[in-house]
Image (tube, helix red, strand yellow):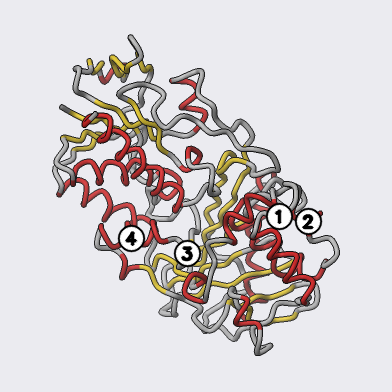
Amino acid sequence: MTTHVVGAGVAGLAAALRLAEAGQTVSLHEATPLAGGRCRALADGTDNGTHALLGANTAALAFLDRIGARERWVEPEPDGLPVLDLLGDEARHVGLSPPSWISGRLRPAGVSLGAVVALMRISLGLGRDRPVAEAMAAYPDFLRGFVDPLVIAALNTPSAEASTHRLGAVLRRLRGPATTRLYVAKDGLGPDLVAPALASVERAGGTIRFSARLRRLLPQGGRAAALDFGEDGTILLGPEDRVVLAVPPWEATRLLPHTEAPADHAPIVNLHFARHAETPVRFIGMLDALCQWVLIRPTGVSVTVSAGDEAVRQEQADLAPRAWAEILRAAKAFDLPGPWPERAPTCRVVKERRATPRHRPGAPPRPKRMPLANLALAGDWTYPDLPATIEASVLSGEEAARALMASARG
């Protein structure tokens, strides 16, 4: 019996590892030359995106433990997140946990009892599902300085259109200071997540082949009967063989046309500046800026623009100088060790036009975990109780693996 895992993103890797560790024969098929999906490292070693984890992401952190990579993720801002508001050049440190706001030193702008109560109502899922900005309209400063950045980071959707119920699912996991501790990959997603995950799958006996795109999935009698990889051949599935389909929603609907899947997606734009300096890893937020989040490593500076509908339409020649000018202002505001040249270094821009579903009000699509008797779906979009994140990817992959193993026992 072989389980074929189609897609070597985080969900596919999580499913493959769980199955291989359970003693199953696992064959992993990836359409591109690299594993990792949206968390992959690009061919030049650059991350395709700047990703952070919180202490609340228990499944993702446990996955890092299982692949021996937990120590590669560091806490860059243990004393509060540095945030620069370009509107008034105001620099402050902000706590991500409400108890840290009591002293005042880590308090976001606009905090009031009413604002906290309104946020708690969202956390508890009270009231109808509506845009976050509408629910927080009475507290514009708090919305602008804390809630909107949180919404954009977690949901990749502006608060003017983001679902309060989806935000509430995030807030309910943020209980206590430990859950709001922020972690980033010290060297990058490739060496600190993807490579150790792939190595763990192979150590457990799994195999992988790259540049193998699934062209057609052939069902028969309510089961997946064959996997057609075009020139790479067709795999006929035996009665005990199984499949994890860990692909983006548009690929899932191409292969299984009746799959319920999100159709509207939001972009993310990432800029990666080549800057080599022996400096600590830092993570900085910015308001009223192109740069929402700035991740500084010894090997470079990375910028994330989530919900980047405007940025995705701009050219690199316009984005890079604008972003670098903002980074210089942050470096000065927080006295970051240099060098910080005035002229923007070499920059690579990565545009993900369909990075995540748009998390708007209304019930999200809920695809069946097992649409066929021997096939399970995985991918962050298949775990709609959470936004499309690394956490949801890991949870979906492990749930798909459990579903297949349970069906085999049944």
Percent x, y of residue 354: 57, 39
Q: Nearer the viewer, mark 1 or mark 2?
A: 1
- The amino acid beneath tag 4 is Ala
* Pointer 4 with pointer 1, Cβ within 8 A: no
Q: How many marks?
A: 4
Q: Earlier in the sequence, mark 1 or mark 3?
A: 3
Look at mark 2 in the image and give the residue it sits on: 133
Q: Residues within 10 Å of mark 2 (few under 14, many from 20)?
A: many
Percent x, y of residue 50: 50, 59
On the question of residue 316 being in view, the answer is: no
- The amino acid beneath tag 3 is Ala
- Give 50 or 67, whichever is nearer the viewer: 67
When asked about the image quadrant of residue 217, the answer is top left
Measured Cα–Cα span from mark 4 to mark 1:
31 Å
Residue 62: which numbered mark, if any?
A: 4
Q: Residues within 10 Å of mark 4 (few under 14, many from 20)?
A: some
Task: Name above or below for residue 21 compared with residue 89.
Answer: above
- The amino acid beneath tag 2 is Ala
Percent x, y of residue 409: 21, 31
Residue 56: which numbered mark, if any?
A: 3
Q: Earlier in the sequence, mark 4 or mark 1?
A: 4
**Residue farthest along the top direction in this orientation:** 221
When asked about the image quadrant of residue 361, the answer is top right
Residue 287: which numbered mark, if any?
A: none
When asked about the image quadrant of residue 373, the answer is top left
- Give 49 or 372, whichever is nearer the viewer: 372
* Pointer 1 with pointer 3, Cβ within 8 A: no
